[in-house]
Amino acid sequence: MQKIYLAGPEVFLPNALEVGNSHKLLCKKYGYEGLFPLDNTITGDNLKEIAEAIRLANQRMIQRCDIVIANLSPFRGPEPDSGTVWEVGYAQGLGKHVLAYSTDMRPLKEKTQSILNLGDTNCDTSGMAIEDFGLTHNLMFSHNVVAPSFEACLKYLKHGFH
């Protein structure tokens, strides 16, 4: 059975374990085994050791998986969670199949303007240009975003992505 690493900011939710278990059940329904970061057992004597243990455990989990499904929905602003984006790049560097979903499929420029209340300007409040290729996300990983939900990603995977 192929293993899917479940990347995303769900680990920060108050009901993270419930959401992770729900995603793992959906994986099973579609014939996959879901690996959720909070399945790892983490120990450490201080916050720095715990953070390092989390990073290394998630890396090992990604190494063990066949596929990564990442939640690239806006997180604390118009961009996805930076840890999730790192995991996407790491998985791609290992040659893993990566696909993603976002609950906000608007073009990045429109999403950024709206979420940051910028009106129709082409720059953010620091004067930095807003990327505008008509893609839903940054051009480096927009091609991975194939669906608006986790289950839609699983359906896409089952019926058209190998």
Image (cartoon, rainbow, N blue to C red):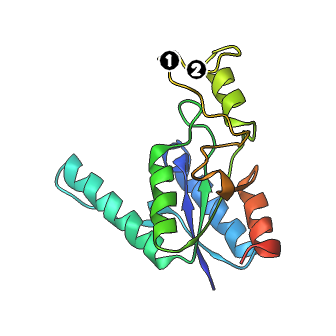
Residue plotted at (21% across, 49% down) = 48
Residue in front for this viewpoint, 58 or 87: 87
Residue 75, how many percent across, how many down?
A: 56, 37
Location of residue 61 (image quadrant): bottom left
C-alpha gap between disc 2 and disc 1: 5 Å
Task: Name the element at disc 2.
Answer: loop
**Percent coordinates x, y for residue 59 in the rendering:** 39, 67
The residue sitting at the left extreme is: 45
Kindly check if marks 2 and 1 are in contact, taking CB atoms under 8 A apart as contact: yes
Q: Residues within 10 Å of mark 2 (few under 14, many from 20)?
A: some
> Is 77 placed above or below 67 here?
above
- The residue identified by callout 1 is 127
* Residue farthest to the bottom, as pictured: 1
Q: Against 156, is 107 above or below?
A: above
In the picture, the disc for residue 123 is: 2
Q: Nearer the viewer, residue 162 or 12?
A: 162
Q: Residues within 10 Å of mark 1 (few under 14, many from 20)?
A: few
Q: Secondary structure at mark 1?
A: loop
**Picture quarter with the N terminus:** bottom right
Q: For the residue marked with disc 1, what is the amino acid? A: Gly
